[in-house]
Image (cartoon, rainbow, N blue to C red):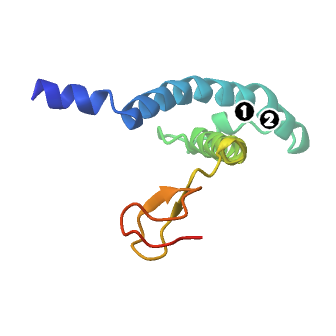
Amino acid sequence: MIKEFKEFALRGNVIDLSVGVIIGGAFKDVVTSLCDNVIMPFFAMFTGKINFDKWVIPHTQIKFGMFISAVINFIIMAFIIFLMVKAMNKLRRKDEKVTTKVCPYCKSEIDIGAIKCPNCASDVE
């Protein structure tokens, strides 16, 4: 069981995921600061100094203004992450070189320079 867990934990996907979670946590603080210190004050200039954090329903503990701020933070964070992933995908596509092709007969993956499939012995172009 320990051996299986070690294989699982050291698999590339798990390590990538853990790095993503750590970077995501740090990134959340950056986006929250951006929203609280730059975007919301700028937004308040055009809306008559509205501060969503102070919006509450009187005589209750329902702070829907803070919820609105959280939604705005989420939308901004999702958009920035979308732009980052889009840029990373563009860079990744440039770096990837095609080294294999698919045999049209047996559908196995073969070297790009092969003229004969090593699996089915068919001639390939």
Could you tell me which quadrant the C terminus lies in? bottom right
The CA distance from mark 1 to mark 2 is 5 Å
**Up/down of 24 relative to 86, above or below:** above
The correct choice, above or below, for 104 with respect to 11 in the image is below
Instruction: Describe the element under mark 1 as helix, strand or loop.
Output: helix
> As drawn, is 114 to the left or to the right of 118?
right
- Residue plotted at (81% across, 29% down): 38
Mark number, residue 24: none
Front in this rendered view, residue 70 or 25:
25
Residue 69 x/y as whole percent: 64, 40
Is 15 left or right of 96, judged from the image as shown?
Answer: left
Q: Which mark is residue 35?
A: 1
Task: Identify which amino acid the numbered label 2 is placed on.
Answer: Ile
- The quadrant holding residue 53 is top right
Along the viewing direction, whichever of 82 and 123 lies nearer the viewer: 123
- Is residue 105 placed above or below 7 in the rendered structure? below
Tag 1 near tag 2, CB within 8 Å: yes
Dot 1 crowding, Cα within 10 Å, few <14, some 14–19, many 20+: many
Measured from the top left, where is residue 57 in percent x and y? 56, 45
Instruction: Provide the residue designation for mark 2.
Output: 39
* Front-most of residues 13 and 47: 13
Q: Amino acid at mark 1?
A: Cys
